[in-house]
Image (tube, rainbow, N blue to C red):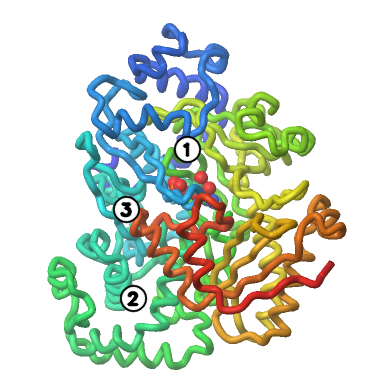
Amino acid sequence: MLEKMEILHVEKVIEEFETMTKDAENVQRETLKKILEENGSAEYLQNLGLNGRTDPQSFKACVPVVTHQDLEPYIQRIVDGASSPVLTGKPITTISLSSGTTQGRPKFVPFNDELMETTLQIFRTSYAFRNREFPVKNGKALQFIYSSKQSRTKGGLFAGTATTNVFRNSQFKKAMKAMQSQCCSPDEVIFGPDFRQSLYCHLLCGLIFREEIQLVSSTFAHSIVHAFRTLEQVWEELCVDIREGILTSRITFPSVRSAMAKLLKPNPELADLIHRKISGLSNWYGLIPELFPNVKYIYGIMTGSMEHYLKKLRHYAGDVPLISADYGSSEGWIGANIDPNVPTESTTYAVLPNIGYFEFIPLKENVEEQVHDRGDANILSMEPKPVSLTEVKIGEEYEVIVTSFAGLYRYRLGDVVKVMGFHNSTPELKFICRRNLMLTVNIDKNTEKDLQQAVEEAAKLIAEEKQEVIDFSSHVDMWTDPGHYVIFWEISGEVSDEVLKECCNCLDRSFVDAGYVSSRKVNAIGPLELRVLRRGTFQKVLDHYLGLGAAVSQFKTPRCVGPTNYKVLQILCDNVAKTYFSTAF
Ligand code: AMP
């Protein structure tokens, strides 16, 4: 469809979405049928006794709910070049490496044309709704997108992060063109071997095309903030390059240099203008509209673990709207942001009922408490049965289970979502947190979300001193008796000991979970510890993940570092500048 079309027909996309979501239950049934028919010959499904049945009841009766760990042996055989169909009917030729921020190592998941098509469908859907509110003209996008290294597995399959697999796919560029969102940087920059060099060149391209830039984006908001923090450091060098028309010697890769040389001409007027504009800013407020006067919005995933970066992003954005991108994962997409007008933190994602078969495990407090501490397998047996897409209830929280066109059947994604409403008959989900990211010592339970709120609260104290928490993480230290929470902070500048002590107490008090508070009162959990890190520590964490094959585009700072993620824990512990213990209880 896209090949023939220059510009996306947004009304048609919306119409198709409306029709489909009015009949979500049937569309789900048909989608499951299609998935099972296309992949019926796969060994995994053959062994489960479906015998050609494709209805939801038989599917649920025969196919177990699984985790990535359960599927690992199958995926490994594909990676190693299995010749028979293992998980999908058609052979898998590409593998995605998920970011692996939680486990500390990337996971392999299958990638195929169907997954690519569903990715584009999500992009087209949210674009269509976004464009009604915030139309972009035929300009350019300053996209902070980067590719990871694409390698070959032992079995000869291509392996790269999911975003890399998407960016490298020929359909991606066509789709971006149809959505009038073409990246202003040449391919050599996007696919450059060193992300720091690519980032510098993205910034340079953005400045060269500053009048044409219609939107600033990245996959996750973290990359946008990271990019503009970098600009604060390198802007004068960028101005020199523009003035002289010669690229700085810090860019060393010949392919990147020659691609940039085609764009870079001596332009002293532009260099002066940028210099003037940046010099006129107060503490970098409104940097983005100042540099890119025609930018309509800033776009990237901004919910969940990205919420921490919104304050900084708003500062750079001034009055330019921030719009969260869609909800999905390397395993497959789930929902699109079809309501770009709502405040970013309240973004919901409407599930597309034809891109996968979705189920939801209800997360009722009482059930969780009963199974606390009994391990994953038991949690599953005691948990309520998963419900289907159209059976979910408004106000309830669920864990998402995905059945995809790329060989995952009843796969626990590990994300917790809350149903906020329905669009026609498809639910609108709010992302809550990762399910397994839990701070727990005793009977306490604090999620990624609780941690974020505590950090937000305590960060207000350093905001009074004009400082900010650049990034944060946490850890449960069980080596002490009793165990206690450790919070790691990287701060933008100097803050006095008194204020940091107060921050530490504030963090401790901000975990309001009854299990935590009561355990703290009787010293069943020790005083919370705040460890202030040296500047650049989280950059080291990022570098560590890049070394494992992750891509900056998909990077998410691990919010809770478990004992098995010892490399990251070591980076954090080796870079502690100051330590404070709470006296709040
Ligand atoms: P990856 O492992 O790199 O494929 O990242 C996928 C994970 O990122 C998801 O399982 C979510 O935990 C998170 N994620 C993706 N989209 C969103 C979103 N819109 N809001 C919050 N978190 C998201």
Q: Nearer the viewer, mark 3 or mark 2?
A: 3
Residue at image point 39% right, 12% down: 46
Instruction: Say what secondary structure mark 1 lies in.
Output: helix
Q: Mark 2 and mark 3 in contact (Cβ < 8 Å)?
A: no
Q: Nearer the viewer, residue 387 or 148?
A: 148
Crowd around label 1: few <14 · some 14–19 · many ≥20 (10 Å)? few
Q: Does 127 sit above or below residue 306? A: above
Could one spot residue 168 in this view of the protein? yes
Residue hosting label 2: 211
Residue hosting label 3: 176
Q: Amino acid at mark 1?
A: Glu
Left or right: residue 572 compared with residue 87? right
Q: Amino acid at mark 2?
A: Glu
Q: Where in the figure is residue 161, as x and y percent of width and height? A: 34, 48
Q: Amino acid at mark 3?
A: Met
Crowd around label 2: few <14 · some 14–19 · many ≥20 (10 Å)? some
To which quarter of the image does residue 40 belong?
A: top left
Disc 1 from disc 3: Cα separation: 20 Å
Left or right: residue 247 compared with residue 207? left
Q: Where in the figure is residue 117, as x and y percent of width and height? A: 35, 37
Q: Does 559 sit above or below residue 106? A: below
Instruction: Say what secondary structure mark 2 lies in.
Output: loop
Q: Mark 2 or mark 3, which is nearer the start of the sequence?
A: 3
Q: Where in the figure is residue 151, as x and y percent of width and height? A: 23, 47
To which quarter of the image does residue 485 belong?
A: bottom right
Residue hosting label 1: 15
Residue at image point 75% right, 57% down: 482
